[in-house]
Amino acid sequence: MTRAETLLWRHLKADRLAGLAFRRQTPMGNYIADFVAHSCKLIVELDGESHVFEERIRHDEWRDQWFASRGYRVLRFTNDDVMKNLEGVVLSILEAAEPVAPLSLTLPRKGGGNPSTDASLTSDDIYPSASPQTEEKP
């Protein structure tokens, strides 16, 4: 492992990051993921200087597509990112690992969802100006 991988591993191992069980150097198909949390289908890859060449970039794209086809999300950071901004990298991983909960819309209960079944939306006590005002004649 590189220095950057060792440093990041200290934050990911033993469920230290929000209780997520990351594994390192995990074989997946024909590839080896640097770090993977199967529970949230997240892969973290650290790229060194060899990843700046066009051929290596294409290889990484194919690899990421293969992971994505199996439902995994891939986060890539450079070794330099980890060495200079470890806190930011860890925060990014944490945010990506949080489950995206669908919006929950509350449906009204049977009867319109009003707690009082005899309440009216235009009753004077709720909306005093909603009722027409009649003048009394002497």
Image (cartoon, helix red, strand yellow):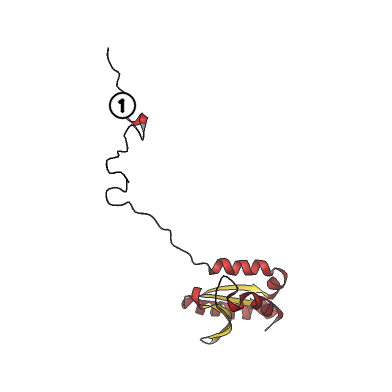
Q: Residue at x 59, y 78 (%)?
A: 14
Circle 1 SS class: loop
Q: At which x and y percent is residue 82? A: 68, 72
Q: Quick one: 24 or 118, which is closer to the camera?
A: 118
Q: At which x and y percent is residue 129? A: 36, 29
Quarter of the figure with the C terminus = top left
Look at the image and tell me whether residue 79 can be seen: yes
Quarter of the figure with the N terminus = bottom right
Q: At which x and y percent is residue 85? A: 70, 68
Q: Residue at x 32, y 38 (%)?
A: 121
Mark 1 — residue? 132
Look at the image and tell me whether residue 53 can be seen: no
Q: Amino acid at mark 1?
A: Pro
Q: Quick one: 81 or 109, which is closer to the camera?
A: 109
Relative vertical location of residue 17 with respect to residue 110 in this rendering, above or below:
below
Q: Is residue 30 left or right of residue 126?
A: right
Q: At which x and y percent is residue 6? A: 68, 80
